[in-house]
Amino acid sequence: MGDWKVPADLKYTESDEWVRVEGNEATTGITDYAQDQLNDIVFVELPEVGASLRKGDSYGVVESVKAASDMHIPLSGTVTAINGKLEDAPETVNSDPYGEGWFIKFTIADPAELGDLMDAAAYQKYCAERE
Amino acid sequence: MTYLPHTDEDRRAMLAAVGVESIEALFEAVPEQYRFPPLDLPEALSEMEVMAELQGLQAANASAQDYAIFLGAGAYHHFVPSAINHILLRGEFYTAYTPYQPEMSQGTLQAVFEYQSMLAALTGMEAANASHYDGATSLAEAITVAVNEARGKRRKIILSPAINPQYRQVVRTYMQGQDIKFVGDKGRADISDLLDMLDDSTAMLTVAYPNFFGQIDDFKGLAERVHAAGALLTVVADPIALGLFKSPGELGADMVVGEGQPLGIPLSFGGPYLGYFACKKALVRRIAGRIVGETKDNRGQRAFVMTLRPREQDIRREKATSNICTNQGLMALSACIYLALMGKCGLRTVAELCYHKAHYAARQIDALPGYKVDFSKPFFKEFMVKCPSPVSEINAALLHDWGIVGGYDLGQDYPHLANTMLIAVTEMNTREEIDALVEALKEVAA
């Protein structure tokens, strides 16, 4: 309990997504805390490349043995890549949520939205509060 | 499971908990004059008198037990082995529902698993769900799958006009308000006309096998063309025919749906019936209903679990795609018992009997003056006959003078098929019945 990885170089949402910003592009997935809460992940449904989404839009579904949950895009943008490996190996999200278990890459439409996201320290605190 | 009614003590405890004196007091909100309105009913009868009255009403029906029946068009008079009811009516099985705590009902889950497995094998698909209401609603669920598989971007559904007209009405009702465009079935389009309607807005193309006229269309190259257009191919199939003909899976179908009534379910004046639904594995996350799977329990023994309920409301909330949260479990069990009793060879024998008897009848009828059977395509257990007078008149004479239930009047649904009768022949029709039909048709025309 309380021992979730929260990499310092990422930003976080209240719905437990992480986002890694590299220039104009971002990568997102679900956090270590989220995968731990969900338990074994058995299916991930991802959007189409080219889908244009607004911050907070549901872009896919992650199903675990416990529940089916929507995933929300942390920033507005257009999907440029999806992690097709998750189709055959959804358990990657459990084993490597911040690495091989990424969900989508997208171009950032409005960098100002980054200010709405939590940093690692704030997210760590947010997780601890919910325990 | 035993049914346990509330005891008087239970009722008192519940009333005390809600703070009400009596059950009557619960209904005080209903104005007194409406609480027990006088009903204009006849004098009460004894059980003996009621039985006599109901049997009299029942005797007024022309049922398949007492009449030679040549009416099909979606519901068929096939043999129902008596073993089915003996198993079906056992207390352990006798519910239409998959239980809410499914894993405690291993017998029910095993039956559903076996039903799914046999349906998948029969249709040549990789998965089958635990059933829908009837063939028409199964087709509607296939449309939902196809539209969602295209992520809602393709909303055109091509329907063959040779699909059961009732199915084509039901799917329009089912999908109303969802901006789905149905094309193809209003005229006389054949398979190649339907293929010409494919475009990048088409989610699905649907054909029937055999078609509503009993015929087997040539589906060579069909799946390739549909898939090349990025659409899915759904086949509406008669499960008995699949005992004899190539499976829709071999023909490249993505989904196979249809009416399961021929599999050990009596005609029963139209229901309850069984919608079967089978598909390729790639689509299982989008289907309505449930899939039961096989696993091992904590002692390593074979066990069954509710494996997948991908689109049900209690799990997927607003992402659910269907209102079907229950199914025709008991009817699926009938089909399961039927298929297990028949086996591969038995089902093939039933199909062969239907085929040969139908062809015998067709040849005899075609030889009659004034009648012409459509031999333009191969057919299974139903065929079209052009008649010398309106079908309704012929049927009235058959019923009243010969004790025969005649075929379906195709002119009701297809204006160009006025005076055309669709005759169904199954293993239940004896040679004597067929010969009597031929004789009767000859007399009626004379």
Image: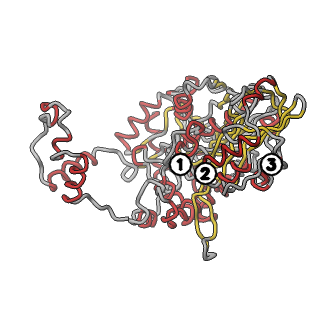
The front one of A51 and B182 is: A51
The answer to whether residue B277 of the structure is visible from this angle is yes
Q: Position of residue B154 (x, y in %)?
A: 71, 28
Label 3: state its secondary structure.
Answer: loop
Instruction: Check if mark 1 and mark 2 are on a common chain.
Output: no
Which amino acid, mark 1?
A: Val
Left/right of residue A43 with respect to residue B90 in the rendered view: right
Q: Residues within 10 Å of mark 1 (few under 14, many from 20)?
A: many
CA distance for labels 2 and 3: 24 Å
Q: Position of residue B419 (x, y in %)?
A: 52, 28
Which amino acid, mark 3?
A: Gly
Say which residue label 2 marks. Answer: A131
Which amino acid, mark 2?
A: Glu
Q: Position of residue A107 (x, y in %)?
A: 84, 28
Label 2: state its secondary structure.
Answer: loop
Image quadrant where one finds the C terminus of chain B = top left
Q: Position of residue B386 (x, y in %)?
A: 56, 32
Q: Residues within 10 Å of mark 2 (few under 14, many from 20)?
A: few
Up/down of B194 relative to B218, above or below: above
Q: Residues within 10 Å of mark 3 (few under 14, many from 20)?
A: many
Up/down of B222 relative to B292, above or below: above
The front one of B367 and B208 is: B208
CA distance for labels 3 and 1: 58 Å
CA distance for labels 1 and 2: 68 Å
Instruction: Check if mark 3 and mark 1 are on a common chain.
Output: no
Q: Residue at x 46, y 57 (%)?
A: B99
